[in-house]
Each structure stands twice: as C-alpha cells, then as structure tokens.
Image (spheres, rainbow, N blue to C red):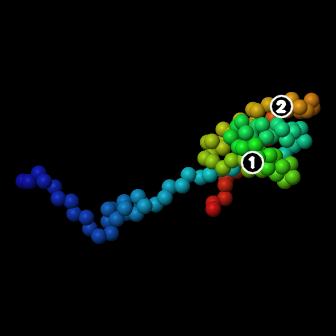
Amino acid sequence: MSTDAEVITLPGTKKKQREEDSEKEFRIPRYNVVLLDDDDHTYEYVIEMLRKLFGHSHEMAFQMACEVDNAGRVIVDTTSKERAELKRDQIHAYGADWRIPRCKGSMSATIEPAEDV
C-alpha cells in the first residue's frame, strides 16, 4: 500500500469556498465619539481637552468647539468600539473647567455606531 495520498478537489467544493472567503473583507465596526454641549465649560477648556485627548490641531479643536456650542453635539473621533469607549471615559474624567467657578465636573460624551460610508 502506498503512503502517498493524493488529494482530489472536485469543482465547487471546499477549495473554491476557501478562496472566496479569503477574498471577503473583514470590517471592524466603527463608532463615533460624540461630545455633548453644556454651559459650564469655556471654549478654551474644550480646545485644550480635544488637543490633549485626541491630538487635534488648535484650528480643528476650535471648529469642534464652535460646532458643539451651536449644534449641541460634535463628533470628535471615529474609531473602534473599544477605543471609542476609552475616549468617552477620558472625556468624562478630564475634570472641571477651573475658569468657571460653578463648573462641577467634566463634559459629557457618548458613543454611537458610525454610519457606513
């Protein structure tokens, strides 16, 4: 008896399915980190926080501060769910705005699934 095994692949069997599977894209779901507006934080606070936590330029952070003030919310990052949760938590832990005596804590943020583009 021979020890050499011959593999025969029939049309439309597992080999073809493996090739199709390897060609499929795997997309990690993306999430938006959304900063919510309030009246207890200054533009300077928002700009400082966005630059420190997200690495945004001063200009981008200023534009986002304007948008959150005017629209009540702004997307500050789009990323994986785990990183979005981390960034939301960092916003919540950033602390009060020392420029406003009545300010008792950090700004609010949430995460939401990003729309597929």
The amino acid on which the numbered mark 2 sits, given as a three-letter code, is Ala
- Neighbor class of circle 1 (other Cα within 10 Å; few <14, some 14-19, many 20+) is some
83 or 51, nearer to the observer: 51
Q: Residue at x 87, y 43 (%)?
A: 38
Q: Which residue matches tag 1?
A: 60
**Is residue 41 left or right of 13 when viewed as pictured?**
right
- Whether residue 15 is visible, yes or no, is yes
Q: Residue 42 in the image: state x and y as whole percent.
A: 87, 39
Please identify the quadrant where the C terminus is shown.
bottom right
Q: Residue furthest bottom?
A: 11
Relative side of 20 to 6, left or right? right
Q: Seen in the image, is 52 located left or right of residue 26?
A: right
Q: Residue at x 63, y 48 (%)?
A: 79
Residue 39 appears left or right of 58 = right
Task: First in sequence, mark 2 or 1: give its number.
Answer: 1
Secondary structure of the residue carrying numbered label 1: helix
Residue 68, percent from left and from top:
82, 49
The residue lying at 79 percent from left, 50 percent from top is 63
Circle 2: element type: loop
Q: Looking at the picture, how far across and down is residue 75, in whole percent? A: 74, 50
User: Is 97 rendered above or below residue 80?
Assistant: above
Q: Which residue is mark 2?
A: 96
Q: Is residue 89 visible?
A: no
Cα–Cα span, label 2 and label 1: 22 Å
Percent from the top left, x then y, of residue 97? 85, 32
* Residue at left offset 74%, top offset 40%: 50
Above/below status of 104 relative to 76: above
Tags 2 and 1 in contact by the CB under 8 Å rule? no
Q: Residue furthest left?
A: 1
Q: Which callout, 2 or 1, points to the residue nearer the camera?
A: 1
Q: Looking at numbered disc 1 in the image, what kind of residue is underneath it?
A: Met
